[in-house]
């Protein structure tokens, strides 16, 4: 029996990796992947607590998160393709039109 | 009678019709006089009818409407016609009619023809309402209205800077006087609680001993009221020291000089003092000052008139001088004599001004005396009528000016005391008056022509539409004086005015003295005439030598005693400098600085803050993470 704290720590580590990825990587696809990591860190928490509390609701929620994440990736990739066509780059530092 | 109402309303209707059609449409243009002239002629006929009915039935009132009611205070607009008003109505409508007719010729071809007729209609209306007022409020309202018309008409040629400046000067200088006048009316209201003439005349004597303190100095309230009212008269009737606007007002078209700045508006001050003479009579101090100002102005303006070169200015200074006589008469308690002189002066001064206009018209706009001469045979009608005007002004019997001026001088002399000094000043002024009147005649009409050759070639007598008013006014200048013959039973004017103005005993009381005084003033007038004849006709080299001999006096007179310069230094320029300071200091730096400063501060803030919007996605993400962390920390620690 693995204690709950292990899952929470794992979730924290994955989440932090996602956050750091969003903050420091310049490739926008990697940033999108990092966001997926953060979502999945949350999913780990949901599943772990679902088991711990013997409540199936948390697992149901995970499915919703996965669905939304899939949809988000579809939209995000479409935007990235459009950006690449327009600007010829997917470097997040180049995509800075929305500034003063 | 309801027709009385039409006397002021006909000119007003002409003003409205001409003014509105000029404003909204193509206007009447050169046909404007077809409306204005019949209106004012109708008004004149009705004035004669009103005069007749006053003679037979006495005074009558007609209230148009009640303007303001507040508590016990009530002010109505209407007309009150008594003997004084009736003679003023006659003067105003007759001169106005003649000037209207004259204007048809004089302003022919002027771009502002219709506008001019509209404004003189408005002026005639305002002046008629002024003289027909039965309370001080209406008097004051139309007092200001005639001032406004004067301003508008002086600035008729507003594109000329000199005309615009003269109009502004007239308005501002009058403002000084009107301010005092308004204060006087306020003071009357605060003491009596009413502005109706009757009530004021009835109540004010009860306060004769009342004293109020101004800055710790006790002042008799009636004296204060009289002096404040007199300030208004000083402004409107161009008395020293507020006379400076009148000569400059000659920048306006000549018919205006004749109507407004000689015969009617400038006499409003004298009319007001006669109308309110029961108030003035209560204060001996104020009366003394008024007489002194009048006598001083009469002499002062006459000395200036001697050396001026602009013909209209000479006549303007002579107007100031003659107004001085009238004010002096009011100050001596002889308002009836003042009003009599006002009437005769209205006739011969309008004649002189219209004559000046005819000369200027004939010489294509020339006003300088030195560029005239020898016009006698070219302008026969103008010459003869102008000669009559000059004789009347100089006071040569039996023309109008003689009787009225002599009446004033006789009153002055019979007052005794300081009155004899005023009489002396008056006689000396009459001598000067004769000199400058005939200087005009001799330099303009006699001698050799000095006008430019091309002007001489175009020289022509004015059209009959201009000469007929001259002839009518000349007839009046001869005959009007006979209304006040100083013979028992023949002095019509005093009989007419007696119900309104106290005439202060009749002049027949001392026939011997009267005849001596008359002889003295005739000698003065004829002496002046002969002096002018020597100086300007037989020995024309003399004046220049005289000017050299008495250079200081000559320069004082020529530069109008430097009054304008003194005002410029003491009042005008400091005011402009102060306004400049306020503008550059308080307004530009203070107020604009504060307003612009607020804007600039907001801009500077924004310039700094907008750096936050870097457009870098990851900066926003970092802020979001840090922010979430901070909020969570606070949340957890605060629990």
Image (cartoon, coloured by chain):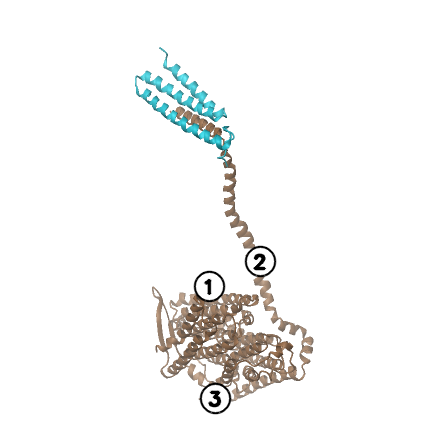
Q: Quadrant of the N terminus of chain B?
A: bottom left
Q: Which mark is drawn over residue A90?
A: none
Q: Is residue B635 above or below residue B63?
A: above
Report how far apart the C-alphas of labels 1 and 2 lie in the structure: 34 Å
Check disc 1 and report the residue beneath it.
B213
The picture places residue B282, in percent across and down from the top left corner, at 44, 73
The picture places residue B399, in percent across and down from the top left corner, at 52, 85
Question: The chain coloured cyan carries which letter?
Answer: A
Tell me what residue is drawn at x 40 percent, y 66 percent.
Answer: B189
Residue extending furthest toward the front: A85
Please state which of residues A33 and B296 is positioned toward the viewer in this rendering: A33
Question: The chain coloured brown carries which letter?
Answer: B
Q: Which mark is drawn over residue B487?
A: 3
Residues packed near mark 1 inside 10 Å, few (<14), some (14 to 19) or many (20 plus): few
Q: Is residue B219 above or below residue B524?
A: above
- N-term-proximal mark, 2 vs 3: 3
Q: Are circles 1 and 2 on residues that touch, CB within 8 Å? A: no
Q: Chain of mark 2?
A: B
Check disc 2 and report the residue beneath it.
B577
Report how far apart the C-alphas of labels 2 and 3 lie in the structure: 59 Å
Q: Chain of mark 3?
A: B
């Amino acid at each position: 029996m693995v204690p709950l704290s292990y899952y929470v720590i794992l979730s924290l580590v994955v989440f932090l990796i996602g956050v750091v990825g969003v903050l420091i990587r310049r490739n926008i696809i990697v940033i999108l992947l990092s966001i997926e990591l953060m979502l999945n860190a949350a999913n780990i928490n949901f599943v772990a607590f679902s088991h711990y509390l013997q409540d199936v609701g948390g697992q149901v929620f995970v499915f919703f998160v996965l669905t939304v994440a899939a949809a988000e990736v579809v939209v995000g990739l479409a935007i990235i393709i459009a950006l690449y066509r327009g600007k010829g780059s997917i470097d997040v530092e180049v995509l800075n039109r929305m500034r003063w | 009678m309801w027709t009385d109402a039409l006397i002021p309303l006909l000119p007003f209707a002409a003003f409205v019709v001409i003014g509105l059609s000029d404003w909204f449409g193509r206007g009447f243009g050169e046909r404007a006089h077809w409306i204005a002239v019949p209106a004012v002629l109708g008004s004149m006929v009705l004035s004669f009818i009103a005069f007749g009915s006053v003679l037979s039935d006495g005074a009558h009132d007609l209230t148009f409407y009640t303007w303001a009611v507040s508590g016990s205070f009530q002010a109505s607009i209407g007309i009150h016609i008594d003997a004084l008003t009736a003679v003023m109505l006659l003067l105003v409508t007759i001169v106005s009619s003649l000037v209207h007719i004259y204007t048809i010729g004089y302003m022919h071809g002027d771009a502002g023809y219709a506008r001019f007729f509209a404004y003189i209609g408005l002026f005639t209306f305002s002046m008629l309402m002024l003289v027909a007022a039965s309370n001080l409020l209406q008097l004051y309202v139309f007092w200001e209205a005639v001032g406004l018309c004067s301003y508008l008409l002086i600035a008729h040629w507003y594109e000329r800077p000199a005309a615009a400046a003269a109009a502004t000067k007239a308005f501002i200088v009058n403002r000084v006087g009107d301010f005092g006048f308004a204060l006087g009316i306020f003071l009357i209201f605060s003491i009596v609680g009413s502005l109706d003439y009757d009530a004021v005349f009835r109540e004010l004597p009860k306060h004769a001993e009342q004293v109020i303190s101004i800055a710790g100095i006790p002042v008799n309230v009636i004296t204060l009221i009289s002096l404040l009212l007199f300030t208004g008269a000083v402004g409107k009737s161009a008395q020293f020291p507020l006379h400076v606007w009148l000569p400059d007002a000659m920048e306006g078209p000549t018919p205006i000089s004749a109507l407004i700045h000689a015969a009617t508006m400038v006499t409003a001050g004298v009319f007001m003092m006669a109308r309110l003479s029961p108030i003035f009579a209560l204060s001996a101090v104020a009366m003394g000052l008024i007489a002194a100002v009048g006598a001083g102005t009469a002499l002062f303006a006459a000395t200036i008139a001697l050396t001026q070169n602009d013909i209209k200015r000479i006549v303007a200074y002579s107007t100031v001088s003659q107004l001085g006589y009238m004010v002096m008469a009011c100050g001596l308690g002889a308002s009836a004599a003042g009003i009599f002189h006002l009437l005769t002066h209205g006739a011969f001064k309008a004649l002189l001004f219209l004559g000046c206009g005819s000369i200027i018209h004939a010489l294509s706009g020339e006003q300088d005396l030195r560029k005239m001469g020898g016009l006698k045979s070219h302008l026969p009608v103008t010459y003869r009528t102008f000669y009559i005007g000059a004789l009347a002004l100089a006071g040569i019997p039996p023309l109008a000016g003689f009787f009225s001026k002599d009446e004033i001088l006789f009153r002055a002399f019979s007052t005794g005391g300081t009155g004899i000094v005023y009489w002396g000043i008056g006689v000396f002024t009459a001598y000067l008056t004769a000199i400058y009147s005939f200087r005009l005649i001799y330099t303009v009409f006699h001698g050799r022509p000095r006008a430019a050759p091309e002007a001489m070639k175009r020289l022509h007598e004015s059209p009959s539409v201009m000469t007929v008013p001259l002839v009518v006014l000349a007839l009046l200048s001869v005959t009007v004086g006979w209304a006040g013959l100083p013979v028992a039973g023949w002095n019509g004017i005093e009989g007419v005015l007696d119900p309104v103005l106290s005439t202060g005993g009749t002049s027949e009381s001392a026939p011997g003295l009267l005849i001596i005084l008359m002889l003295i003033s005739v000698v003065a007038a004829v002496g002046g005439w002969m002096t002018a004849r020597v100086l300007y006709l037989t020995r024309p080299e003399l004046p220049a030598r005289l000017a050299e001999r008495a250079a200081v006096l000559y320069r004082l007179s020529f530069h109008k005693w430097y009054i304008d310069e003194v005002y410029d230094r003491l009042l005008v320029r400091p005011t402009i400098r102060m306004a400049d300071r306020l503008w550059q200091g308080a307004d530009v730096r203070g107020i604009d600085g504060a307003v612009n400063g607020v804007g600039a501060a907001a801009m500077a803030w924004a310039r700094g803050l907008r750096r936050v919007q870097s457009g870098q996605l990851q900066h926003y993400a970092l802020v979001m993470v840090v922010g979430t962390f901070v909020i969570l920390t606070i949340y957890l620690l605060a629990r």
